[in-house]
Image (cartoon, rainbow, N blue to C red):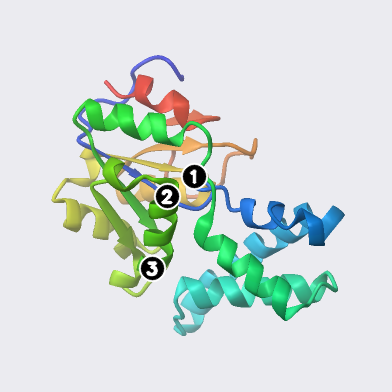
Amino acid sequence: MAGTPVIGGIRACVFDAYGTLFDFTAAAAACQDELGGQVKPLAALWRDKQLQYTWLRALQQRHADFWQVTGDALDYALDTLDLASPALRERLMSLYLDLATFPEVPAVLSELKSRGFVTAILSNGTPPMLAAAVRSAGLDDLLDAVLSVEEVGAYKPHPSVYQLAVDRLGIAAGAISFQSSNAWDAYAASAFGMRVVWCNRYGQRPERLPGKPDAVVSSLAELPALLA
């Protein structure tokens, strides 16, 4: 579908942050000197536990912000891989505030802005985490809003998170194109009523969940051509 306009009536492009705009594996990769062959296993386990803890805390109604969840998930991953070290933990958490964007991100956001689309982030991240990442990547002038789930006290895929974007931007769900590399997030936004482009960077299979993306791409570079 990429390359052919398939989504019309869009006024805003809203992006997930981690894994979509920012490469969550970058922190572990920057510690290659200490991690060696454990870079990929650590990055994968850290991310898996990070997401699991958001969902498990939500089910228990014991919310903690994403910074704490990220630290707890890292502690689990380091312990599991026999890498526990206070200095390494501190280094990895610091690097998580300075994640690299995927290569195409600045140019895509710039093009969308030039075409008159409202641009925003909608993320599990805390406001300080997101502010640090946006500032480090130099995206401040390319985003109209940076929205954190902390405003509603619930994690994705709770509908209140997607409603937050509707309320804060003042734009109907059907006029928002939501982009995420997380299939479960993409499907949830679709079920909520947003138009959705799933950025399937990792070659995943489609989910068996409510909702269905309007388009599937392998890179955000394909997004502008999809928007009529």
Q: Label 1 neighbourhood size at 10 Å, few (<14), some (14-19), many (20+)?
A: many
Task: Identify residue type, mark 2.
Answer: Asp
Q: Position of residue 43 (x, y in %)?
A: 70, 57
* Drawn side of residue 35 relative to residue 69, left or right: right
- Disc 1, disc 2: CB below 8 Å? yes
Location of mark 2 (residue): 16
Does 75 sit left or right of 54 as displayed? right
Camera sees residue 126: no
Label 3 neighbour load within 10 Å: few <14, some 14-19, many 20+: few
Give the quarter of the figure containing the C terminus. Answer: top left
- Residue 122 appears in the rendering: yes
Q: Nearer the viewer, mark 3 or mark 2?
A: 3
* Residue at the spot 68% in from the left edge and 73% down from the top edge: 89
Residue at 65 percent across and 35 percent down: it is 203
Compare marks 3 and 2 and give the one earlier in the sequence: 2
CB of mark 3 within 8 Å of CB of mark 2?
no
Q: In the rendered view, would you say 45 is above or below 57?
A: above
Left-right relation of 136 to 162: right
Which of discs 3 and 1 lies nearer the camera? The answer is 3
Amino acid type, callout 3: Pro
Indicate which disc, 3 or 1, sits on the residue closer to the N terminus: 1
- The three-letter code of the residue at mark 1 reads Thr
Q: Which mark is residue 128?
A: 3
Q: Secondary structure at mark 3?
A: helix
* Image-based side of 36 in relation to 26, left or right: right
Distance from the alpha carbon under mark 3 to that under mark 1: 18 Å
Disc number placed over residue 12 in the picture, else none: none
Q: Which mark is residue 20?
A: 1
When asked about the image quadrant of residue 5, the answer is top left
